[in-house]
Every structure is written in structure tokens, then in C-alpha cells.
Amino acid sequence: GDPEESFNRLVRRHGGDVPARAMLDELVRVGTVRNEGGRVTLVRQGYVPHESESAMLDLFATSATDLLSTLDHNLSGEGERRLQMSVAYDNVTAEGVEAFRALGAKRGLALLRELDAALREHDRDVTPEASADAPDEPGRRAGLGLYLIEDPLDGADAMNGGHDDER
């Protein structure tokens, strides 16, 4: 069908009352899509606010709160422990960091896409029929976050050698 009409339908379905043109302009501005002669092409999956300091602070606050909430829950000893895992070595070469960064981005995005599809089926806003089994049950927020650990070492840290730490 007509690509412009497809985009308009997509915005009407998921963009609330934001006009399709405003949505397109913003997606182009932040580098998520390209608009070439009316043909909208996805450049990046997902949105990370690079230019808006307030949007970055909101993202930071949400991510930090999510991690701290998980740590607090696990330390409390109440209920089932929440997933909390990481892997880090403390004497990695610059080449190794670059390779790890690329692998993490590629595999992380693939995992998040898979998890997004699985969780989407149970979100009542996206999939209203998800409420059919328990219409009066209160909703919950659920998700999984990934982050890259990358810090320079001072001289003393570099002397200690590498180790693997999975939790």
C-alpha cells in the first residue's frame, strides 16, 4: 500500500493525538527514521534521547530507580529474588572493550526485541485482550534492563589482574 498512509495509520494507532507530520518530524530529528521522498525508513530500533537533557535525566532516573528497586528487593529477603546478573572483567584491552561493546549492542538488541515481543502480549494497553483472564487484577510494571560497564582503571586496579564476576 501507500507508505505515507501506512505511517499515518501507525501514528493514529500508537501516537495518541500527536499529528502524523509532527511525529515524523520528531523521529527524523532524533535520527530514528529517514524520510526520503515520502518513504519513511527505520534507521534505529528504539529511542534514546541524545539532545534533550531533560529526557536523558528522565531516562537516567527511571533506570537508576529500577536497578535500586531490584537491589533493595533482593536485599530485603522478602519474596522471590529478582533477576540481577552482570559480567565484568577489570583489565580488558581497548580492542577487547570495543569488541565487547559491539557484541553487547548486537546481542542485547536481539534479546530486548525478543523480550519486547513476549511482554507486549501481556500489556493491557497494547493487547487489550490480555485482561480477559483477570479483568479486575491490578496492572504491574515489568521489564528487563541492560547496560554497558566501561570504566578506566587507575594504576593500582590494573595491577590486580582480571576476574569474572557474575551475580
Image (cartoon, rainbow, N blue to C red):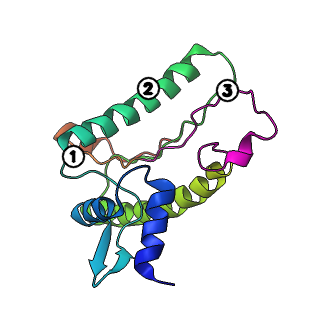
Residue under label 2, please give it. 68
- Tell me the tag on residue 40: none
Instruction: Judge left or right: residue 142 versus residue 62.
Output: right
The quadrant of the image that shows the C terminus is top right
Whether residue 53 appears in magenta in the rendering, the answer is no
Q: Residue at x 31, y 50 (%)?
A: 91
Place of residue 76 in the rendered image (x, y in percent of width and height, measured from the top left): 58, 14
Q: Secondary structure at mark 2?
A: helix
Residue sitting nearer the eye, 29 or 111: 29
Q: Earlier in the sequence, mark 3 or mark 1?
A: 3
Which numbered mark, 1 or 2, is in the foreground of this view? 2
Can residue 108 be seen? no
Instruction: Judge left or right: residue 149 versus residue 28.
Output: right
- Tell me the tag on residue 138: 3
Place of residue 37 in the rendered image (x, y in percent of width and height, measured from the top left): 28, 85
Could you say which quadrant of the image residue 134 lies in? top right
**Are discs 1 and 2 less than 8 Å apart at CB?**
no
Could you say which quadrant of the image residue 105 lies in? bottom left
- Tell me the tag on residue 152: 1
Q: What's under tag 1, amino acid-wise?
A: Pro
Q: Secondary structure at mark 1?
A: loop
Distance from Cα at disc 3 to Cα at disc 2: 23 Å
Q: How many marks?
A: 3
Which span of residues is magenta-colored? 122-146
- For label 2, the crowd category at 10 Å Cα-Cα, with few meaning under 14, some 14 to 19 and many 20 or more, is few
Q: Residue at x 43, y 68 (%)?
A: 8
**Are discs 3 and 1 less than 8 Å apart at CB?**
no
Which numbered mark, 3 or 2, is in the foreground of this view? 3
Can residue 120 be seen? yes
